[in-house]
Image (cartoon, rainbow, N blue to C red):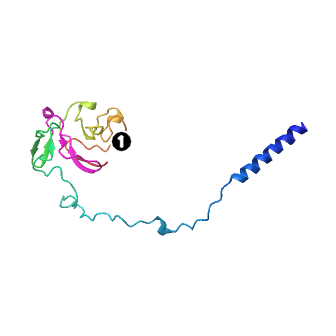
Amino acid sequence: MKHIITGLTLSLWTFSALFAQEQKTYPEQEPMGPKMTEYWTPQPKVVTPGDILTNTAPSDAIVLFDGKNLSQWTNGKGGDAGWRVHDGIVTVDKSKGDIVTRQSFGSFQLHLEWCVPQGITGSSQGRGNSGIFLQDRYEVQILDNYQNETYVNGYVGAIYKQTPPMANPMRKPGEWNVYDIIY
């Protein structure tokens, strides 16, 4: 037993000595100061912010709907969007299918105001179902969830069938809802 303990102690001492020899030393670095974490270029572009009172967009915004026509949109096959524009409002025409922007976008901030019509009928996913498709991959759900239950990852504001919304802020049919999507 005495030989085992002596051998074990000798092995640990040898290992410790080898480990101590292999440690590297590094030159001392200068202390970190605030200027070491600051960078000054490139400077961000200066833009004029939008004005909520006059309903104007920021100066760098690409306006996809001017209240008059859908010239920035297509039916996805290169043809006209085919949805109706009246009094500054776009109305979905189910028979025309989806619409897509003529211009492609990578990252963006989208401001969208939408309304479910009064007197809408149906239940669950059959009541005002639509969405904003991102890269033909993700859908931000638009649905009338005012006193209308459905599966939670299909609620208004969900990333459809992936992530449920954190809350259900749906307004009554006939009242306007707002999305600000940053992607």
In the image, farthest residue toward the right: 2
**Residue 114 percent location from the top left of the image:** 21, 45
Quadrant showing the N terminus: top right
Vertical arrangement, residue 14 with respect to residue 24, above or below: above
**Residue 4 percent location from the top left of the image:** 86, 37
Residue 175, visible in the rendered structure: no
Vertical arrangement, residue 48 with respect to residue 4, above or below: below
Asked if residue 136 lies left or right of residue 41, the reply is left
At label 1, the amino acid type is Pro
Residue 14, visible in the rendered structure: yes
Corner quadrant of residue 152: top left
Vertical arrangement, residue 152 with respect to residue 32, above or below: above
Tell which of 128 and 107 is nearer to you.
107
Q: Residues within 10 Å of mark 1 (few under 14, many from 20)?
A: some
**Residue 91 percent location from the top left of the image:** 14, 41
Asked if residue 36 lies left or right of residue 106, the reply is right
**Residue 122 percent location from the top left of the image:** 22, 30
Residue at image location 33% in from the left, 39% down from the top = 159
| Residue holding disc 1 | 165
* Residue 36 sits inside the magenta stretch: no
Mark 1 element type? loop
Residue at image location 26% in from the left, 44% down from the top = 171
Q: Which residues are magenta?
A: 92-117
Asked if residue 27 lies left or right of residue 59, the reply is right
* Residue 113 sits inside the magenta stretch: yes
Asked if residue 168 lies left or right of residue 57, the reply is right
In this rendering, the count of numbered labels is 1
